Image (cartoon, helix red, strand yellow):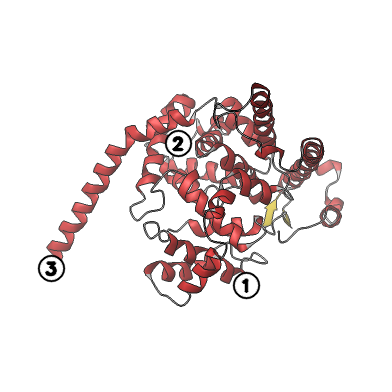
């Protein structure tokens, strides 16, 4: 991890603000801008209250860490990898009950956050990345990196174009070393899966994976399991058909989960894809603070892509009253962008996402996707025909 700032350093930085925080101007706290680095090296800009929220969140993370360590001490280092209750009928009843208890405990723990020091190991195991890596030769990533070195494709050209635009100013990512590591991961995957190749948005996802995982190779396998197993198919292919399906599913869910908001936005002729496309393509990495994004990813890698819908709906839900009094599309976008950029409390976001939004099973989401796929493919086919006819007319 990069750019880690100690609590003492943060306290010293805040002390410089103390002289202007007198009781007579206490109400101006929200107007005092404070800049600091978060746990992953990103420069965060917020007010004093935002800093206080972050400190409270980090204290909760430390408390969670003690819970995880206690479980490792009592159940073993890899207790969360014990056989699943769904792995066959040969398991004894006592073992099934033990696995069920572990699964329930693990789900609750992950929603409360994986301690940063354990995050690489837990992600790699629970996401399926470790299993995927184990099916390939030990030298797979190094061999792939060497094999594609110096090769030029449309994907590599786009990657080179996007490298300096990926989290500019970050103390490690925005360096020659950071650019080189990110390039190797993205170029390597573009050759592993030529159907995906490279799609803008993946640069932000891969960059954040590099900051979390212990090695570049582990980041590559996390990207692979994310695109091949966790997310819906074709999210990052040329026509983004999977992403279009997700947008339609989200549009269907909004009236069911947030009916007042959906009705108001329909009156404004607001298309939710104006904000949600970036959320789903970048997995919130460009929209939420990094520490909040990684809390979302904790749940994503364990519970699957349905989590993205929960979180997207929660962002709308949290600002329901403000959204209901908007009169212009621009106002809606501003509220949602400002809200997401200042969501420093992941517990608040995830509580709304799962408790207030309510249950949504993976099966339900899958049915919605199947329902939307024909319309999306027909729309994309029609768009392709229009483009082809324009090219013919131009000749």
Residue closest to the far bottom: 150
**CA gap, disc 3 to disc 2?**
45 Å
Above-or-below relation of 34 to 305: below
Spot occupied by residue 333 in the image (x, y as percentages of width and height): 49, 44
First in sequence: mark 3 vs mark 1: 1
User: Could you tell whether 119 is left or right of 252 in the image?
Assistant: right
| Residue bearing mark 2 | 327
Q: Quadrant of the image for the N terminus?
A: bottom right
Spot occupied by residue 195 in the image (x, y as percentages of width and height): 36, 57
User: Could you tell whether 45 is left or right of 364 in the image?
Assistant: right
Above-or-below relation of 285 to 82: below
Nearer the viewer's eye, disc 2 or disc 1?
1
Seen at 44% across and 25% down, the residue is 256
Of residues 249 and 314, the one nearer the viewer is 249
Seen at 71% across and 42% down, the residue is 78
Residue 175 shows up from this direction? no
**CA gap, disc 3 to disc 1?**
46 Å
Q: Quarter of the image holding residue 297?
A: top right
Of residues 168 and 180, the one nearer the viewer is 180
Mark 3, Cα crowd under 10 Å, few <14 / some 14-19 / many 20+, is few
Mark 2, Cα crowd under 10 Å, few <14 / some 14-19 / many 20+, is few
| Residue bearing mark 1 | 177
Seen at 75% across and 43% down, the residue is 77
Nearer the viewer's eye, disc 3 or disc 1?
1
| Residue bearing mark 3 | 395
Mark 1, Cα crowd under 10 Å, few <14 / some 14-19 / many 20+, is few
Local secondary structure at mark 3: loop
Local secondary structure at mark 1: helix
């Amino acid at each position: 991890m990069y750019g880690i700032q100690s609590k003492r350093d943060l306290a010293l930085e805040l002390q410089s603000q103390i002289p202007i925080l007198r009781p007579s101007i206490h109400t101006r706290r929200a107007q005092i801008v404070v800049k600091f680095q978060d746990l992953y090296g990103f420069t965060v800009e917020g007010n004093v209250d935002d800093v206080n929220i972050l400190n409270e969140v980090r204290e909760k993370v430390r408390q969670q860490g003690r819970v995880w360590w206690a479980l490792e001490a009592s159940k073993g280092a890899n207790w969360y990898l014990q056989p699943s209750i769904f792995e066959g009928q040969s398991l004894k009843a006592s073992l099934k009950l033990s696995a069920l208890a572990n699964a329930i405990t693990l789900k609750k723990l992950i929603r409360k956050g994986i301690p940063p020091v354990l995050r690489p190991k837990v992600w790699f195991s629970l996401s399926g990345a470790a299993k995927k890596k184990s099916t390939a030769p030990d030298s797979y990533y190094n061999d792939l990196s060497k094999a594609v070195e110096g090769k030029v494709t449309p994907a590599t050209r786009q990657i080179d174009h996007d490298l300096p635009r990926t989290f500019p100013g970050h103390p490690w990512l925005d360096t020659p070393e950071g650019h080189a590591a990110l390039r190797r991961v993205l170029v390597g995957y573009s050759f592993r899966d030529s159907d995906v190749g490279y799609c803008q948005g993946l640069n932000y996802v891969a960059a954040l994976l590099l900051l979390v995982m212990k090695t570049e190779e582990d980041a590559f396998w996390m990207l692979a399991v994310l695109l091949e197993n966790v997310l819906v198919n074709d999210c990052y292919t040329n026509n983004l058909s999977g992403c279009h399906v997700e947008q339609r599913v989200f549009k269907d869910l909004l009236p069911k989960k947030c009916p007042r908001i959906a009705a108001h936005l329909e009156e404004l002729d607001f298309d939710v894809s104006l904000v949600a496309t970036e959320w789903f393509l970048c997995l919130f990495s460009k929209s939420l603070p990094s520490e909040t994004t990684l809390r979302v990813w904790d749940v994503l890698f364990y519970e699957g892509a349905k989590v993205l819908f929960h979180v997207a709906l929660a962002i709308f839900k949290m600002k329901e009253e403000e959204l209901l009094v908007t009169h212009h599309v621009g106002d809606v976008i501003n509220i949602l962008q400002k809200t997401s950029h200042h969501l420093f409390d992941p517990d608040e976001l995830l509580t709304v996402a799962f408790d207030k939004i309510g249950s949504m099973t993976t099966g339900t989401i899958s049915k919605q996707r199947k329902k939307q796929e024909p319309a999306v493919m027909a729309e994309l086919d029609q768009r392709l025909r229009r483009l082809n006819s324009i090219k013919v007319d131009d000749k």
